[in-house]
Image (cartoon, grey):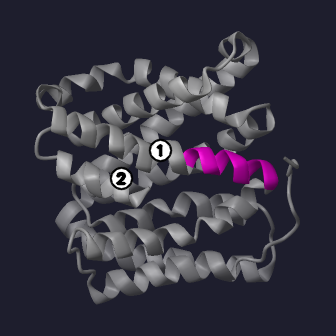
Amino acid sequence: MYAGAAIAIGLFSVASPAGVAWLRCLGAAAVLLAWRRPPRSAWTGRAFVLAGAFGVVTAGMNVLFYEAIARLPLGTAVALEFTGPVVVAAFGSRTRRDVFALLLVAAGVIAIADVRLEGSLLGVLFALGAAAAWAGYILLGKRVADGGNGIDGLAVGFAVGTVVLSPLAFGTGAVWASPRLLVLGVGMAVLATVVPYALDQVVLRKAGQARFALLLALLPVTAGVIGFVWLRQVPSLPEALGTLAVVAGVALRSPGKRDDSAPL
């Protein structure tokens, strides 16, 4: 996912962040539709409405996230965005351990935000907006996964998201004139969307949404490593400590029961 985000950052010099996010949505829709070829039933009734809502929320999450990483280091943006899964995980149980975990996460987010508010308040707001959308992604994604073949729903959802957000295509003009940039766009879509989101659908069917949110604790660490190795983004001490606090808070959260899970 964050290797794809690193490619996206490279495209920001020729297209707007929101436009790059739309390209990611378009590329993912094209690949998923060619791979899955969803049946007619996936395009009608409740299944279509649910998949469409999921696709629009997910595409919106990507737009907000790309606007955030255009203004913040990748690891910082992901740590802030991670508050969405933390809230979902917190509602899975209400033990003292969970309260402490939430306080630890909040302290981490404050440490990160305090560093960045003066330099890029807008970046922080975009990242927190992406966090809210990420919570929606988990809740809706669980329903799509349990409602049938989740990956077919993923394909339909991204097709709907591409159409709904099509005005953002006006920020991608330069990409269409370069075959190399188009290949990078498709690679970004496969790395950042097709592979991780298809795997998410599998995991969401086997685990409940709270446990799934807990497993996402791996993502801020991955983002920080990718940002450091690929993009040469070295975190400051408060940012590094804040990121570690976010991850530690989610790791401390009690696993709880296997909530609303469905076997494969």
Residue type at mark 2 is Gly
Residue 168 position, x and y percent, is: 28, 26
Label for residue 4?
2
Nearer the observer, 35 or 215:
35
Residue 198: say if magenta. yes
Q: Which quarter of the rendering shows the N terminus? A: bottom left
Please state if 182 lies on the left or on the right of 88 as rendered: left
Residue 98: x %, y % from top left: 73, 76
State the residue at coordinates (74%, 63%): 211
- Spatial CA distance of label 2 from label 1 is 8 Å
Q: Which residues are magenta?
A: 197-206
Q: Quadrant of residue 226?
A: bottom left
- SS under mark 2: helix
- Would you place residue 75 above or below residue 7 in this image? below
Say the numbered circle drawn on residue 193. 1
Task: Give the secondary structure at mark 1.
Answer: helix
**Residue 251 numbered mark, or none:** none
Residue 61 magenta: no
Residue found at x 18% / y 67%: 119
